[in-house]
Amino acid sequence: MDVILREIRDSDLPVFFAHGQDPESVRMAAFTHEDPADRAAFDAHWARIRALPDVLNRTVVPAASPDEILGHVAVYGPPDEREVTYWIGRPYWGRGAATAALRALLLLAPERPVYARAASDNAGSLRVLQKCGFVVTGTDRGYAAGRGEEIEETLLTLKA
């Protein structure tokens, strides 16, 4: 799937919020907000990260239909600890949107190394990261609000 990354607009946020209401998406992402249905917390989070100068956030849209919102991608953190994150709405899973979006983001943010993490049982996300050149560098355990328990996460790195 060909995608375009564009600046996030206020009108994108209701779509992002709706994507975050899907129980299967929340379970797969695992490391979500404590209460994905809390719109005030969602709005506060987005207001905060959109104001940070070291966060590069983009909305993902299909090249063939730029009014349709597939999800969002970002890179954040200090220069030596940059990390990527992405969320693609479940209707678009398995169509190459996440891989195309992450590849496009990595062109906009050429700093290396850059890091990523995913729930160790999230095979789709791990596959996306590996297709984009990330290599597994370890595992960790952390509390996953999307599952209400501590789970294993896989740590990955993209070097030069």
Image: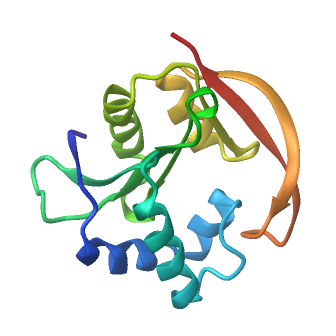
**Which residue is at the far top?**
160
Return the x and y of residue 129 as percentages of the image width and height.
54, 31
Protein image colouring: rainbow
> Left of 101 or right of it: where is 31?
right
Residue 16 horizontal side relative to residue 136, left or right:
left
Q: Position of residue 39 (x, y in %)?
A: 51, 88
Picture quarter with the N terminus:
top left
The quarter of the displayed image where residue 3 is located: top left
Left or right for 136, reference 90: right
Q: Nearer the viewer, residue 10 or 53?
A: 53
Q: Residue 73 placed where, x, y %?
A: 41, 49
145 vs 23, nearest the viewer: 145
Residue for point 67% across, 82% down: 35
Q: Residue at x 86, y 53 (%)?
A: 142
Kindly tell me whether residue 19 is visible in this rendering.
Answer: no
Q: Is residue 28 left or right of residue 51?
A: right
Asked where in the image residue 77 lies, by quadrant, the reply is top right
Q: Position of residue 80 (x, y in %)?
A: 62, 26
Look at 42% across and 50% down and name the residue there. 53
Can residue 62 be seen?
yes
Seen in the picture, residue 66 relative to 136 is either above or below; the reply is below
**Closer-to-camera residue (105/94):** 105
Whether residue 64 is situated above or below residue 42 in the rendered picture: above
**Going 23% across and 54% down the picture, which residue do you hit?**
61
